[in-house]
Amino acid sequence: MVKVNLGGCDSFIKEADYKAYVEKALEAFDTLENETGAGNDFLGWKHLPSKTLEGTLVQEFEAVRDDWKARGVNAVVVIGIGGSYLGAKCAVEALSHNFAKQLGTGDAPEIIFAGHNLSEEYLCEMMDYLKTRNVATVVISKSGTTTEPAVAFRIVKQYLENCYGKEEAAARIVAVTDAKRGALKSLSTQEGYRTFVIEDSVGGRFSVMSPVGLLPIVLGGFDVRALLEGAKEMEELCAKRCIECNPALQYAAMRNLLYGNGLSTEVLVTYNPKLTFLAEWWKQLFGESEGKDLKGIFPASVTYTTDLHSMGQFVQDGARIMFETVVSVEKSQRSLVIEADPQNLDGLNFLAGKHVEECNAMAELGTRLAHIDGGVPQMQVVVEKVDAYNLGSLFYFFEKACGISAYMLGVNPFNQPGVEAYKKNMFALLGKPGYEEQAAALQQRLK
């Protein structure tokens, strides 16, 4: 379960101001719960954890897993961009052994990702690797025409057909797409691919509890039921109109108060490298949801203690434009004790007998206090450990808090009008039919 500690903000705010922002948070909460706000046709994510646990989707994912295992698949390419890959990537990184690939342990296939960039080197090097593996793919796109995943899928699909033949390739392709329309849906029907549906009411950055995130997590061998149970607990907790018991309300109220006080950047801090991609997922969730109408808190992230030796200087002594939200993990799942050294040349014998994680915890506490003293407010989001259950809790907590927070800002949390601007320019510069006039205008600007 997620807990929120706001004590690190006490010296930076007035109690009366916090109470006022709590009222604003409750109003935004009502808008979200009553489904009366902008974008209210994109609220299907709110009950995904409980609905999925009650249904048969997980068994269907496991059927794909078992079929591909019987075919000897040991590498699955998950093709998607933005919310179509970041949630799954976060889960794979958080729940895997850091050195699983080098150790060669486990019988689940390796999950690798494509379609999230247009780097020719990346795709060529990925294909070098796939030629050494037994391959299947999951392609995730509502339309099937988003450039980055469409390019990657064209390449991987051609490889599978050349390598295994068209019929066998079709058995190694699963599409997660729209129920009725779009290029990928049409192709799946034509070729006989297994498909899972992205509901119209679930936007990409809120889709980790849908087949978009859950299927890759199952294929990677992780406990998706535990993840859903953690999310379901937060679904129930974050539905309560109660500032004392709803951590999403507490977090949304405080971050908007700090923003109202002139702090325009939120830095998500983790002390466990397994959570690096939690921060990447979080940045998309909040950045794409709130960054519009010339408003929004800029989402940034660091992994301490590593980044204390780089970004730590700016946070401690730089421009006072930010606050930090620290994701704290109470327990390590491994044990390693520092031993005494007879020579003690490094001067570390005072640590003899201590667990490494105790050093990490004291580094976290010391840093939080130092940054507060330096003028950086601190919020703390606490989970027991890094496992599937707690990761599911974090996913849902941040999703619910994001919806509340965006409504507090006065923006639609569920659209992304600014994302289209670069696409139009890219299509014109690449010579896509229908973009000739825009291409000519762009070429004039580039002279």
Image (spheres, rainbow, N blue to C red):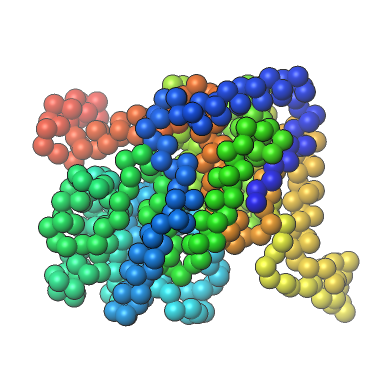
Q: Is residue 217 left or right of residue 417?
A: right
30 vs 59: above or below: above
Residue 110 in the image, given as x and y percentages of width and height: 41, 70
* Mark count: 0
Q: Is residue 235 left or right of residue 15?
A: left
Q: Is residue 167 left or right of residue 426?
A: left
Residue at x-position 28% and y-position 74%: 131
289 vs 14: above or below: below
Residue at x-position 38% and y-position 42%: 202
Residue 179 in the image, given as x and y percentages of width and height: 25, 48
131 vs 3: above or below: below
Residue 401 in view, yes or no: yes
Residue at x-position 85% and y-position 72%: 353
If the image is split into quadrants, where does the C terminus sit?
top left
Q: Is residue 247 left or right of residue 337?
A: left
Foreground of the two, 349 or 325:
325
Residue 238 in the image, given as x and y percentages of width and height: 59, 40
23 vs 63: above or below: above
In this view, the residue farthest toward the front is 54
